[in-house]
Image (cartoon, coloured by chain):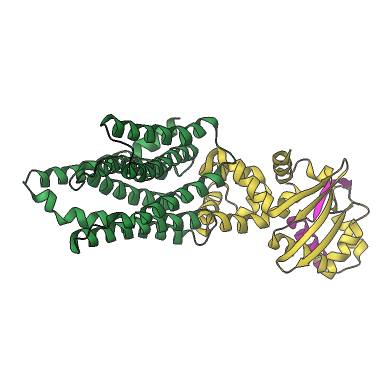
Amino acid sequence: MNSLDRIVAKGIKSVLEEDLGKVTYNKVEREVFEVFGMTVLEAVSDFPKIDLTLRKFFGKHTTNIESKIFKKILSVEKNTKTESTLTIKDPIVAKTIFESYGDPVKKIILDILIDNPKSIPETIMASKLPKASAYTRIKEMIQDGLLTMVGHTSAADGRKINEYAVTFSKATFEIQSNGMTVNVNMPNKFLKDSFTFNSIYESTQ
Amino acid sequence: MSSIIYEIKKSYKAPIAILAFVAIITLGLKSRVGIFEQSAIFDILIFLLPLAASIASFVVSNRYGDSKVFGRSYFLLGCGFFATFLGELLYSVYDDVLDESILDNFDYLFVAGCLFTIFHIVINVRYFAEKLESYQKVFVVLIPIFIVSMYSFLVFANSHEPDYYFYFNLLFVALSAVILGLVIAGFTLFRHTVLISAWFLLLIGFFVGTIGDLEFRYYHTFGGDYLGNNSTVLWIASNIILVYALYRHQKAI
């Protein structure tokens, strides 16, 4: 599951409701639950599942609808060899990121992981925060796509555990009269398997 | 392809049944001398059915809230049917009740009705397709050209000089033909979606309505008495099919 797709997941609901209506979204939601036994948010994070459901409703036009949805949520501003600059326009997605950076515990975790990837136990230890609180926040940030799994390391008992890094190397918030936008820099290695990024990138080529 | 045929098989019986029902009622009335011409049933249905279609469109629009595609497009379609209803109502009031012949003055309401319908189809088509396929573009262009040419040919084949009535009616024939071309393109676009039945019924409804328009405009060009000809029957059937199409749309998604 890609981090950017997880971030975008929160915006899909609002955009689908805005374009096709709450009733249509509810039908999609019901179908996702009946077929995969999961919520739309979970299905969007695992993109082929929501894609399959939308295809059942809209056939080959799903690609076009998805591209429209993604473009409403974010745009690719700059694309270099190593990094891409994205603007997140959807207010719900932008608010989620803003709240994470505004949360003191999450901010400490982000600061720890910005330079070097670490496992969850290493991060908790380095943060000197209460274990339960730090663990909950890390899990939330993984779920929201703000932390990306980058590899594996060995725990003290020899178990293989995941290592996480900060998804955005830079984030700038802009608060305007019509809402909030976030400009973020993301390493291309995090984007290469993103359904959202590839969909937008292909349509702009 | 098989799923398209399956969906069409599920939907084609309703328009045939509606057409047959309306035709039988018409024949029944026609068989009784003088009743058809004087029948108030058709005069009432001709303006009540666009109102029913308008209400059905507003119900569908309300179901999708103020969403940018379904909500707005079905609201516009409702406005289109409402404009047609007003046109038909004023037509009937002036023609039957007041017995005044200023009939053409209300035709701008029918133009508005057509334009609203065109906006409805364009909104749907533009959202679901980035651009039309070549064969869909052919439908959008060739069908209006074919219908307008056919109307012109029929008029001129009867040694009619191009006068005000010809150009006036040509506008309505062209608008109906553009709607039909767009609906055909829309149907081909939605044929792989859950909306196939709704768009199939919309296509049949508008097709039947276009034939009715064509016949009415042909008679109107010659200043003929159009009451009692087939266009009334076709319009009634068309509106019933369109109401049913709207019902199927809100059931599908």
Q: In this orientation, which residue lies closer to the viewer: A110 or B75?
A: B75
Name which residue lies at 33% across and 35% down: B151
Q: In this orientation, which residue lies closer to the viewer: A145 or B163?
A: B163
Q: Could you tell me residue A71's position as x and y percent?
A: 68, 50
Q: Could you tell me residue B54's position as x and y percent?
A: 36, 58
Q: Is residue B71 magenta?
A: no
Relative height, residue A130 to residue B133 (above, below): below
**Which chain corresponds to the colour yellow?**
A
Looking at the rendering, which quadrant does residue B16 occupy? top left
Name which residue lies at 65% across and 52% down: A42
Relative height, residue B96 to residue B180 (above, below): below
Tell me: B86 left or right of A190.
left
Q: In this orientation, which residue lies closer to the viewer: A71 or B194?
A: A71
Residue closest to the far left: B33
Q: Is residue A150 magenta?
A: yes
Magenta region, residue range: A133-153
Q: In this orientation, which residue lies closer to the viewer: B62 or A26?
A: B62
Q: Could you tell me residue A64's position as x and y percent?
A: 61, 43
